[in-house]
Image (spheres, rainbow, N blue to C red):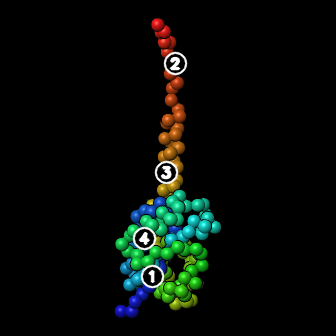
Amino acid sequence: MQNKIVYVSGTFDLFHSNHLKMINYARGLGNTLIVGVSTDELVCSYKKPPTIPFEERITIVEGLRSPDVVIPQHTLNHSTTVDNLNIDIFVIGDDWVGKYDYLREKGVKVFYFPYGKGVSSTNLKQKIYTQYAEILKESDIHPIPEPKEHNVL
């Protein structure tokens, strides 16, 4: 069997089970797995900044069993990465469906991993925000006690 090089791309903010599933899926598609972690600058170019800084996110991904190599990802255009690393297979979440079909012209198999319903960094951020707002409301809304007189001797 010929060595197949797989590249999986993502922000991997608030690392969760769907990130792990996508990386493990990609691992099963080839012999060498390279994971590209989007830099903070790249993420900020198209959406709000990640909650977890780049250095932390890349360290988390490096700690996983599946990747052979973990690299910073500086651009959403993966043509140069595909050429420089001889990528055979490209994997990304299905929220990007159609965006990387151009890689097929280079002979790369493109897979859009189905995240499905439920866990996503965006959903986690919203849940944390909502829960925090409730905690603040509970801590800020309370009866104010009447001051007691103190007897001074």
Query: Residue lying furthest front in this view?
Result: 153
Q: Earlier in the sequence, mark 4 or mark 1?
A: 1
Q: Earlier in the sequence, mark 4 or mark 3?
A: 4
Badge 1, how many Cα within 10 Å: few under 14, some, many 20+?
Answer: many
Tell me what residue is drawn at x 48 percent, y 65 percent: 57
Tell me the tag on residue 146.
2
Q: Nearer the viewer, mark 3 or mark 2?
A: 2
* Residue 77 position by quadrant: bottom right
Q: Earlier in the sequence, mark 1 or mark 2?
A: 1
Q: Earlier in the sequence, mark 4 or mark 2?
A: 4
Q: Position of residue 25 (x, y in %)?
A: 40, 75
Query: Residue lying furthest right in this view?
Result: 45
Q: Position of residue 140 (x, y in %)?
A: 53, 34
Q: Position of residue 109 (x, y in %)?
A: 48, 85
Q: Earlier in the sequence, mark 3 or mark 2?
A: 3
**What element does badge 1 sit on?**
strand
Q: CA distance from mark 4 to mark 3?
A: 26 Å
Badge 3, how many Cα within 10 Å: few under 14, some, many 20+?
Answer: few
User: For mark 4, what is the residue?
Assistant: 62
User: For mark 1, what is the residue?
Assistant: 6
Q: CA distance from mark 4 to mark 2?
A: 57 Å
Q: Are marks 4 and 2 in contact (CB under 8 Å)?
A: no
Q: Position of residue 69 (x, y in %)?
A: 44, 77
Q: Nearer the viewer, mark 4 or mark 3?
A: 4
Tell me the tag on residue 128.
3
Tell me what residue is drawn at x 50 percent, y 29 percent: 142
Q: CA distance from mark 4 to mark 1?
A: 16 Å
Tell me what residue is drawn at x 47 percent, y 79 percent: 7
Which amino acid type is marked by label 1?
Answer: Val
**What element does badge 3 sit on?**
helix
